[in-house]
Image: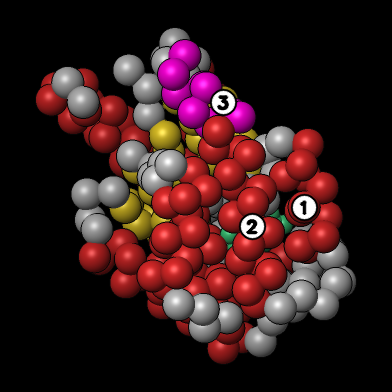
Amino acid sequence: MSWFITFEGPEGAGKTTQCHALATRLRDQGYDCLVTREPGGTPLGEAIREWLLGRNTLRAETEALLFTAARAEHAWERIRPALARGTIVLCDRYVDSTLAYQGAGRGLDERWLRELHRVATGDLWPDLTVLLDVPVELGLARRRAAGETLTRLDSELTSFHERVRAWYHTAAQREPTRWRVIDATKAPETVAEAVWVAVAEFLEQRKRTGR
Ligand code: TYD
């Protein structure tokens, strides 16, 4: 059995660290595991990433199409084959980022974005999505403190990032079987433990029900 698990959240929530920490724990338990990210995950995806995160001026529609184009390659060339081999796929951001950033953030129609996703990926959705939740100001302050270069999206107004975070909260409430919300303001080890508890419970439940 294989599962597709995604990490989502506002800027500076620690998704990348937590994705790798979870992979280590899953491997320790004997699971085969692929860690990947978006935008990226394939050579074309990484090239598109450069464009999207660089200082280019893009229309919102173009931005959504590029994120989705990268995702089409990623879904068909890496994620689906890994799932077919029985590998657990952990992905740092996926379609919910498009719905949150290009939908709620930029104001594009969510139904159009969902339709694009359906066509681009054959409607591949995660089995489980971990929302690492931090207040916008704290996440952005972490980014600055770490001395990271701010991307084009990081540099959006606070109100943009507030809309993104609010969308995540609504999505998690709307679909509680897929989403797990974790308080990511805590120390990384505490967050890793909470993620592990949530994922281990999910895996147990899926094994019990045979899905
Ligand atoms: P990244 O440096 O990977 O940031 P993070 O560590 O927060 O994931 O940059 C990814 C950026 O791209 C981030 O600001 C969110 C944004 N993004 C979208 O706007 N739409 C998308 O579909 C995806 C996958 C990411």
Asked whether mark 2 lies closer than 8 Å to ligand 1, one says yes
In space, the residues marked 3 and 1 are separated at their CA atoms by 21 Å
Residue pointed to by mark 1: 48
For residue 126, above or below residue 200: below
Give, as a three-letter code, the residue at label 2.
Phe
Query: Quick one: label 1 or label 2, which is nearer the N terminus?
Result: 1
Whether residues under marks 3 and 2 lie with C-beta atoms below 8 angstroms apart, the answer is no
Residue pointed to by mark 3: 34
For residue 169, above or below residue 209: below
Query: Quick one: label 3 or label 2, which is nearer the N terminus?
Result: 3
Give, as a three-letter code, the residue at label 1.
Ile
Part of the protein shown in magenta: 77-85
In space, the residues marked 1 and 2 are separated at their CA atoms by 8 Å
For residue 108, above or below residue 71: below
**x and y percentages locating residue 104 in the rendered image:** 48, 78
- Residue at 56 percent of width and 72 percent of height: 102
- Residue at 33 percent of width and 66 percent of height: 171
42 or 201: nearer the eye?
A: 42
| Residue 100 is a magenta residue | no
